[in-house]
Image (cartoon, helix red, strand yellow):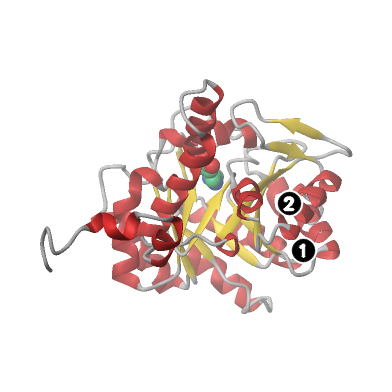
Amino acid sequence: MSSFPAYRPRRTRRTPALRALVRETRLAVDQLILPLFVCPGQGVRRAVGSMPGVFQTSVDELVKDAREAYELGIPAVLLFGIPERKDETGSLSWHEHGVVQEGVRAIKGELPDLLVITDVCMCEYTSHGHCGVLHGVSVDNDRTLELLARQALSHARAGADIIAPSDMMDGRVATIRRVLDEEGFSEVPILAYAAKYASAFYGPFREAAESTPQFGDRRGYQMDPANSDEAVREVLLDIAEGADIVMVKPALSYLDVIRRVKEKTGYPVCAYHVSGEYAMIMAAGQLGWLDVERAMTEALLSIKRAGADMIITYWAREYARRQR
Ligand code: PBG
């Protein structure tokens, strides 16, 4: 490499056209996934206080949001359900006519080309708010696997295009893959929340999904933020069990993990720019402390630069509108 004055890095920064020519990273709208929250009822559209621009909607309103995303060129939505009622085992999570199952049917009926991804987890459906069934005060891993597979199968039967388990039980990818294959859904991919950390940045989501644990926390099953060797092991395990796409979550505090996972596996990597990461920027924007559009674009670009192939973001529609 040459040095100053032969090399002047500012030469290629002088104009927008020059900057575009040498730009290394681009984030396209067709690499974004929009999360949506579906609840019971008709004509329901409830704002989530800590996430400006995010709503809990009934199925009819959900289809409107999905249509808007589709028309903006966003290829996929990710559905979370807020059920009619919760119980110990989260039994509404695998109900044929549960909120997510009905949401999938409605979207696929009207927008067959929009990919519908479903989050598979128990925490929105259990009365205690944990991601599986309890044995005493801890989550019983192996009993939970069967229920997760039942939930995943009900989503596939409703027409889900991709199944995304987020529970962090050991062995869930293998169990879900086996059940999907046995029931004729061998072509439905699994997007595994492979390296999912026990993070403070999920706070606003738990308001949106009404899934705050009623006691304790999720550190008994989600990952310790201090670990990244373990993240690689988690990801390799999920790949060995049949994951097609692997996820790192949250994104911004874990950019190093995204990079390691990408380099180590060469698999498609999805990053989840989570609720707290979204809320921080939106809140600072409301206070006039930073420019939301520039900050959000910079955050998303950094996730892409770290090695993510696709990003789940609550800002997907805004990003798409600004690209037009
Ligand atoms: C369910 C789940 C969570 C998120 C996605 N799936 C919450 C949690 O694990 O507590 C968080 C998403 C976000 O914060 O945007 N297990």
Position of 252 with respect to 132 (left or right) is left
Q: Quadrant of residue 28?
A: bottom right
Q: Amino acid at mark 2?
A: Val
Can residue 131 be seen?
A: no
Task: Tell me: is circle 1 under 8 Å from ligand 1.
Answer: no
Residue at image mark 2: 100
State the separation of the CA atoms marked 2 and 1.
9 Å
Q: Secondary structure at mark 1?
A: helix
Instruction: Inspect the image, locate mark 1, and give the three-letter code of the amino acid beneath it.
Output: Ala
Residue found 49% across the figure and 50% down from its top: 272
Name the residue: 42% across, 58% down. Answer: 304
Q: Nearer the viewer, residue 275 or 148?
A: 275
In the figure, is residue 79 to the left or right of 104? left
In x, y percent, where is residue 165? 54, 57
Give whichever of 94, 36 is nearer the camera.
36
Q: Quadrant of the N terminus?
A: bottom left
Task: Give whichever of 180, 144 is nearer the camera.
Answer: 180
Q: Position of residue 80 (x, y in %)?
A: 66, 47
- From the top left corner, tell me how far across and down residue 306 is, in percent: 35, 57
Residue at x 65%, y 44% (from the top left corner): 90
* SS class, disc 2: helix
The quarter of the displayed image where residue 263 is located = bottom left
* Quadrant in which the C terminus is drawn: bottom right
Asked if the residue at tag 1 contacts the one at tag 2, i.e. Cβ–Cβ closer than 8 Å, the answer is yes
Q: Quadrant of residue 50?
A: top right
Q: Can see residue 46?
A: yes
On screen, residue 33 versus residue 244, left or right, reads right
| Vertical placement of residue 35 versus 136, above or below | below
Q: Which residue is mark 1?
A: 158
Q: Position of residue 129 (x, y in %)?
A: 57, 35
| Residue 186 drawn above or below residue 110 | below
For label 1, the crowd category at 10 Å Cα-Cα, with few meaning under 14, some 14 to 19 and many 20 or more, is: some
